[in-house]
Amino acid sequence: MTNKKILLFDVDGVLVHGYHANPKYRICWDKDLKEDLGICPERFTKEFIFDTFRNVINGERDLKEALAEDLPKLGFHGDPQEVIDYWLKKDSNINTDLLQHIKALKETGKVRLFITTNQEHNRAEYLMKNMGFENYFEDIFHSARIGATKPSEHYYNKVTELLDLSSNEKPILFDDTPNVVEGAIKHGWEAVQFNTVDDFTNHPFIKSIL
């Protein structure tokens, strides 16, 4: 339980310019995947991301082991770690405008800041340590750790438990995905669909303390 307002942030489409639920705001990390590693991005998305990766992102499988099994089918016969390193580096376009506001919020001492994201273990660690998010956020509640993805009820229940929220505490979630926002609201949180930084700065609570 806390007297400070809890703010929760998604990664892709919010903290990082990358995959956004709205194609208008989407930046694809894999646009040069074919040229750089010889892997067709469309096939990688269809045959790995939308299939095998589902069991990685919920913590059931290890990313490197899953890639080692699937990459040869996609024409890549090198070390899967090379693909992981490439993926992590390319998918790291930080939303610097938003992060500057988050830094200012942190300095007010009136909020607690956390990340809530559908993410596997490798990238969760990369986000916190290599990309420096550990300097802004207390913790990252990624799906592989939770054992479920947003917008499942189990995910929201587990994060509520980890935050030790009382029944009258309503954290604010900023997320780009409509059904995630809807699920959070249904769970009793406040949630805002994020397209641009204005969706954050125009929120009444944020405006009141920045």
Image: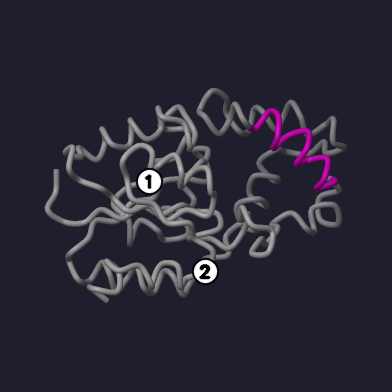
Q: In the image, 74: left or right of 171?
A: right
Q: Position of residue 38 (x, y in %)?
A: 86, 48
| Residue annotated with mark 1 | 140
Which of the two residues, 82 or 8, is positioned nearer the viewer here? 8
Q: Is residue 89 magenta?
A: no
Residue kind at label 1, given as amino acid type: Ile
What is the quadrant of residue 165 in the picture? top left
Q: Which segment did they paint magenta?
A: 40-53
How far apart marks 2 and 1 lie (CA) works out to 22 Å
Is residue 178 depicted above or below 26 in this figure?
above
Residue kind at label 2, given as amino acid type: Thr
Residue sitting at 84 percent across and 36 percent down? 74
Q: Nearer the viewer, mark 2 or mark 1?
A: 2
| Residue annotated with mark 2 | 196
Q: In the image, 117: left or right of 33?
A: left
- Which secondary structure, mark 2? loop
Quarter placement of the N terminus: top left
Residue furthest out toward the top: 60
Residue sitting at 33 percent across and 31 percent down? 158
Is residue 24 depicted above or below 46 in this figure?
below
Mark 2 / mark 1, whichever is N-terminal: 1
Looking at the picture, the colour scheme in use is one colour
Quarter placement of the C terminus: bottom left
Which of the two residues, 79 or 206, is positioned nearer the viewer here? 206
Secondary structure mostly taken by the magenta-highlighted segment of the chain: helix
Label number found at residue 125? none
Residue sitting at 54 percent across and 49 percent down? 177
Q: Position of residue 81 (x, y in %)?
A: 66, 41
Q: Position of residue 52 (x, y in %)?
A: 68, 28
Residue sitting at 32 percent across and 45 percent down? 189
- Which secondary structure, mark 1? strand
